[in-house]
């Protein structure tokens, strides 16, 4: 008799809820432990703003567009680039067309996609979260361009996280845990260590890159899978290879 695959989602609640609904619709049993929350940051928009704009996430779109529009930026005159299809869809929902790589959404792959555009500009603005995509900034600066980081949100630990983890532990443990970044790995590791429930480090993790995979293994997680496509659809495709009996 087959057993429904239980997947624990650790993204911020707004993203996790939508992903959990998609997983449930695909026949998985999704649960949520939101390790972080999103807070809007007010940013000073430089004027004039470079017409080459990179949005690194759907959060960057949601928190950045209102501020760009309030500053009088004519987005229709800008060259908009999105990291990943979810970011492109968030821009499209606002009536904005963007360029996005067909595949590969990490900094090196985005740089390859942008090479022609970078030759036409001397400056680029990256709309991102606090501390995010520092490597992308470094890669673009190596091409001789000035980079403005517009940090429009920050992630911070969710409230009552220990209590939420205790509640999760009263249920049957998940078969897989989806974790997207190194900060989340550190938070999850701290929760597990503090609960004296070390068997949670035997639960397989699914992470978004080889760099995060290395961090997870260094944090004591025994089995860590790396999905080749770090998007929501990529996670769903990756999970399809697992079956429980």
Image (spheres, grey):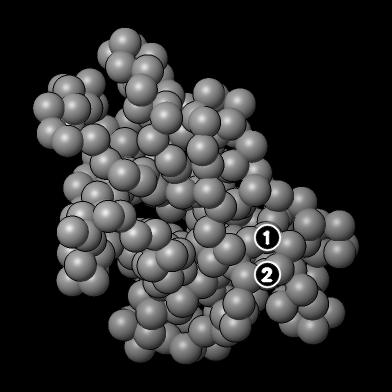
Q: Residue at x 54, y 24 (%)?
A: 219
- The span from disc 1 to disc 2 (Cα, nearest Å) is 5 Å
As drawn, 2 above or below 76 = above
On screen, residue 45 above or below 179: below
Q: Are marks 1 and 2 in contact (CB under 8 Å)?
A: yes
Image point (53%, 59%), residue name: 227
- What mark, if any, has residue 110 been given in the picture? 2
Q: Residues within 10 Å of mark 2 (few under 14, many from 20)?
A: many
Instruction: Between residue 77 and residue 137, name the one nearer to us.
Output: 137
42 left or right, relative to 44: left
Image x and y of residue 173, in percent: 23, 35
Q: Quadrant of the N terminus?
A: bottom left
Q: Which secondary structure lies at badge 1?
A: helix
Can the viewer see residue 205 in this picture?
A: yes
User: Is 129 positioned to the left or the right of 212 in the image?
Assistant: left
Pick the residue in front: 234 or 112.
234
Task: Point out which mark residue 169 bears.
Answer: none
Percent position of residue 15, x then y: 28, 57
Q: Quadrant of residue 172?
A: top left
Q: Residue furthest front?
A: 1
Labels in figure, total: 2
Kindly indicate the quadrant of the structure image that contains residue 95: bottom left
What is the secondary structure assignment of the residue under circle 2? helix
Of the 4 image quadrants, the one containing the C terminus is bottom left
- Residue at 36% x, 75% y is 90
Q: Which residue is mark 1?
A: 107
Measured along the vertical axis of the image, is residue 36 above or below residue 124? above
Closest to the observer: 210 or 64? Answer: 210
Q: Is residue 29 above or below residue 158?
A: below
Q: Is residue 11 left or right of residue 162?
A: right
Please name the residue shown 70% across and 49% down the image: 135
């Amino acid at each position: 008799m087959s057993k429904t695959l239980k997947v624990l989602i650790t993204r911020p609640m707004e993203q996790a809820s939508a992903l959990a609904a998609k997983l449930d619709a695909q026949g998985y049993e999704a649960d949520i432990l939101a390790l972080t929350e999103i807070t809007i940051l007010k940013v000073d928009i430089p004027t004039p703003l470079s017409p080459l704009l990179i949005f690194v996430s759907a959060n960057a779109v949601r928190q950045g567009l209102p501020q760009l529009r309030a500053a009088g930026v004519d987005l229709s005159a800008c060259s908009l680039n999105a990291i990943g299809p979810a970011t492109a869809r968030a821009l499209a929902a606002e009536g904005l067309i963007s360029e996005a790589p067909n595949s590969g959404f990490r900094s090196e792959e985005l740089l390859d996609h942008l090479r022609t555009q970078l030759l036409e500009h001397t400056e680029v603005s990256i709309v991102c979260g606090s501390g995010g995509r520092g490597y992308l900034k470094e890669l673009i600066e190596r091409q001789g361009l000035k980079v403005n980081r517009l940090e429009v949100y920050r992630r911070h630990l969710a409230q009552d996280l220990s209590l939420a983890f205790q509640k999760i532990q009263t249920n049957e443990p998940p078969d897989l845990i989806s974790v997207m970044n190194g900060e989340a790995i550190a938070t999850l590791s701290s929760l597990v260590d503090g609960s004296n429930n070390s068997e949670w480090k035997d639960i397989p993790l699914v992470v978004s890159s080889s760099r995060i995979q290395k961090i997870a293994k260094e944090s004591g997680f025994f089995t860590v899978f790396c999905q080749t496509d770090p998007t929501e659809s990529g996670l769903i495709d990756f999970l399809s290879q697992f079956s429980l009996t």
